[in-house]
Amino acid sequence: MEGSQPSMSDSELIILCLLPSILALLLASILIQRRHQTRYNKLNLPPGRAGWPFLGETIAYLKPYSATTIGAFMDQHISRFGKIYRSHLFGEPTIVSADAELNRFILQNEGKLFECSYPRSIGGILGKWSMLVLVGDMHRDMRSISLNFLSHARLRTVLLREVEQNTLLVLSSWKEHCTFSAQDEAKKFTFNLMAKHIMSLDPGEMETEQLKKEYVTFMKGVVSPPLNFPGTAYRKALRSRSTILKFIERKMEGRVQRMTEGGAGDSSRDDDDLLGWVLKHSNLSTEQILDLILSLLFAGHETSSVAIALAIFFLQACPRAIDQLREEHLEIARGKKRAGETELNWEDYKKMEFTQCVISETLRLGNVVRFLHRKALQDVRFKGYDIPCGWKVLPVIAAVHLDPLLFDHPHHFNPWRWQNKCASKPSRTVVVFNFGVFFNMPKCQIISCHSAEDRGSARDPSWLSSRWRFSSTIWYSTSAGS
Ligand code: HEM
């Protein structure tokens, strides 16, 4: 119409309405930053930068990169600021550490100077009773329940047998000259193993397959941005989480009923899986049991399946390692044939020394878990830098695994480097092992070339007293001899 004013579009109207709130938020964040700045000016913070308001440098930090590298973000920051730098990540002021000594210090002081501190969204999806989220006494209790279940004896007998059976099952499903995805096969294998171990679910059964389907959706959400809107992977994962929990709860009710009907003298069959074990030997609430089971399924499945797929990936480029592996296994097979044995036992397992070197090297180079989330519980001073109380601290394990000062040609897959653990860099390597590998290897990834003394320390109860040491024991027990 002639002479009429152009009317405002809907989007312009929304922007106009939101503008005051956005400005207020910006102003508030600037004021908070200023207030903190005054305190931080007195501290000697590591060099670094804060990035964008709210977002900080999170997007650049999380940009995907190859598992065998530390990524462009880390590379650039380390060359500009050094191995310890400050940033703003996951919504919090953060100290990032690619420094082996600081990483070790952080993990040694777990519960004293630092504690586990994963983003809130992890608790939302894994559950508030998940071991990754818990701290303090409750964390200790949950951990000791899991450790009691995963006793060394049990791992030697039950788990080893299950691993063998599941391996044979996967191998027998491969047709000659066919192509398959190593990653999918590894996922299938670890899921079946965990489902059996945790709830006695048999591979191929309808309920196992249904659970697997839900679990896949759940997993996609765990590794996606925590946006709880219709259609997002996170929202779908939350739905799958409740379906999975209902499934576990039904199993639990069935067990409780069987136990009541069977009376106190019920057979030890129910002790054979984690569900039965916690029902009988702990006084955890239903909600706690559900979170424990789901988070163990997650912790055991995601990590191990990636590690197996990576081992296949690295090996196909290293024929010499394949030959040596094959020879080691054939030698054991020949010995068993001579002894008239068929099933693999712990003694056979302990003989697989080169196999263990391959595992160690895969875990080092593959960096299944790249960094950990911690928080400073008090002001900490390290190497002249201040880490303020309440700040997020990220020990980047991958940076240590790929540090040329610690490992010769760190980007090269070389399982033989573990054959003589003190070979080329005695002092540093020894530190790794004296500490029980933890500072260089994620905690479930204990390296097998432990000396007898190392193994002794693994059985010392005090060894189990920190969070960091929990699943190393699991991995130790499952992958190293004693
Ligand atoms: C290659 C295989 C594995 C890798 C690389 C791996 C890596 C890790 C890492 C780095 C952590 C530490 C998280 C943190 O403290 O912030 C962790 C924790 C944990 N892992 Fe594993 N893991 C593996 C296998 C397993 C398996 C097979 C299980 C169980 C059956 C398991 C159960 C757990 C549990 C329960 C925790 C939490 C422990 C605690 O908070 O005390 N992991 N894992």
Image (spheres, helix red, strand yellow):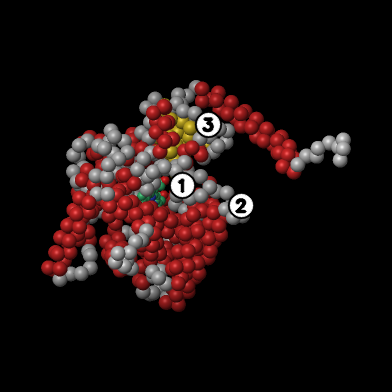
Q: Let me know if residue 471 appears in the view.
A: no
Q: Are marks 1 and 3 in contact (CB under 8 Å)?
A: no
Identify the amino acid type marked 3.
Answer: Gly
Nearer the viewer's eye, disc 2 or disc 1?
2
Instruction: Tell me residue 188's x, y (percent).
Output: 38, 62
Which residue appears farthest toward the bottom when viewing the image? 261
Identify the amino acid type marked 1.
Answer: Val
| Cα separation between marks 2 and 1 | 29 Å
Identify the amino acid type marked 2.
Answer: Phe
Q: Secondary structure at mark 3?
A: loop
Q: Secondary structure at mark 1?
A: loop
Instruction: Tell me residue 398's x, y (percent).
Output: 36, 41
Hey, which quadrant is residue 11 in on the image? Answer: top right
Label at residue 135: 1
Label at residue 51: 3
Q: Is residue 468 left or right of residue 223?
A: left
Residue beneath disc 2: 229
Determine if the C-beta at disc 1 is less than 8 A from ligand 1: no
Q: Which tag, 1 or 3, sits closer to the chain's start? A: 3
Determine if the C-beta at disc 3 is less than 8 A from ligand 1: no
